[in-house]
Amino acid sequence: MLLDALNRQDTLTVKDLLTEGGDGECQWEMSESRASTADLPQAKIYYCSFCLRPSDEVAKLVAGHGRIFICDESIATCNDYILTGKSDRPPRAPLEEAPTERLLSLLKPIEETVAGKSNQLQSAVETLRSRRVSWAHIGQALGISRQAAWERFS
Ligand SMILES: [Zn+2]
């Protein structure tokens, strides 16, 4: 289910996940286009793009475009903020203050998040090129020159 959604590049957003329940509390709404860690292949670890926790350490992991994911706890944090304008969760310490072992453990999740967005960007550019959109227009949209766009994406 998740891989199908990723292959179709379905848009799965936090907004889509929130519905107003009868008691006024936000609830999860799961449909076929949404996935959880139970749907992921066991050999591959995915990471929450917000808190960087691996899929085997969270209850649910929801996929978005470009293989960006958000876990149930990060969504709960978002819910808190959306509903109350603040979050009761303590702020995370800056990366510069993290112990070396913690920083080393974060490299793979950060790299996978960046790679996912990079793949999405490349795919979007390739789609635009297949529609005969010029390198000049693509470069303009990215704030770079036509030449820089061509060199980066061709
Ligand atoms: Zn998370």
Image (tube, helix red, strand yellow):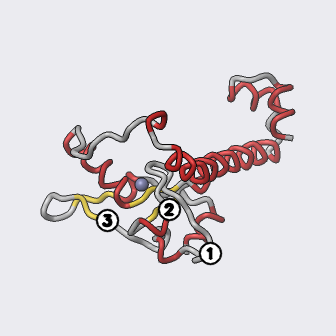
For marks 2 and 1 on the same chain, the one whose residue lies earlier in the sequence: 1
Total marks shown come to: 3
Q: Which residue is mark 1?
A: 43
For marks 3 and 1 on the same chain, the one whose residue lies earlier in the sequence: 3
**Image: 45 above or below 50:** below
Q: Residue 75 in the image: state x and y as whole percent.
A: 35, 54
Instruction: Please rate how many residues cluster around mark 2, counting C-alpha atoms within 10 Å: few if below 14, some from 14 to 19, many from 20.
Output: some
* Residue appearing at x 56%, y 60% in the figure: 10
| Horizontal side, residue 146 vs residue 114: left or right | right
* Residue appearing at x 53%, y 44% in the figure: 100
* Residue appearing at x 42%, y 72% in the figure: 31
**Image: 133 above or below 55:** above
Q: Quadrant of ligand 1?
A: bottom left
Which amino acid does the dot numbered 2 rest on? Answer: Pro
Between the residue at mark 3 and the residue at mark 1, the CA separation in whole angstroms equals: 27 Å
Q: Residue 133 in the image: state x and y as whole percent.
A: 79, 37
Q: Are marks 3 and 1 in contact (CB under 8 Å)?
A: no
For marks 3 and 1, give the one nearer the viewer.
1
For marks 3 and 2 on the same chain, the one whose residue lies earlier in the sequence: 3
Residue sitting farthest toward the front? 100
Q: Which residue is mark 2?
A: 54
Between the residue at mark 3 and the residue at mark 2, the CA separation in whole angstroms equals: 21 Å
* Residue appearing at x 80%, y 26% in the figure: 136
- In which quadrant is the C terminus drawn? top right
| Horizontal side, residue 86 vs residue 113: left or right | left
Q: Which residue is mark 3?
A: 28
User: Judging from the image, what secondary structure is the residue with disc 2 in?
Assistant: loop
Which amino acid does the dot numbered 1 rest on? Answer: Ala
For marks 3 and 2, give the one nearer the viewer.
2
Instruction: Please rate how many residues cluster around mark 1, counting C-alpha atoms within 10 Å: few if below 14, some from 14 to 19, many from 20.
Output: few
Does the closest atom of ligand 1 sit within 8 Å of the Cβ of label 2?
Answer: no
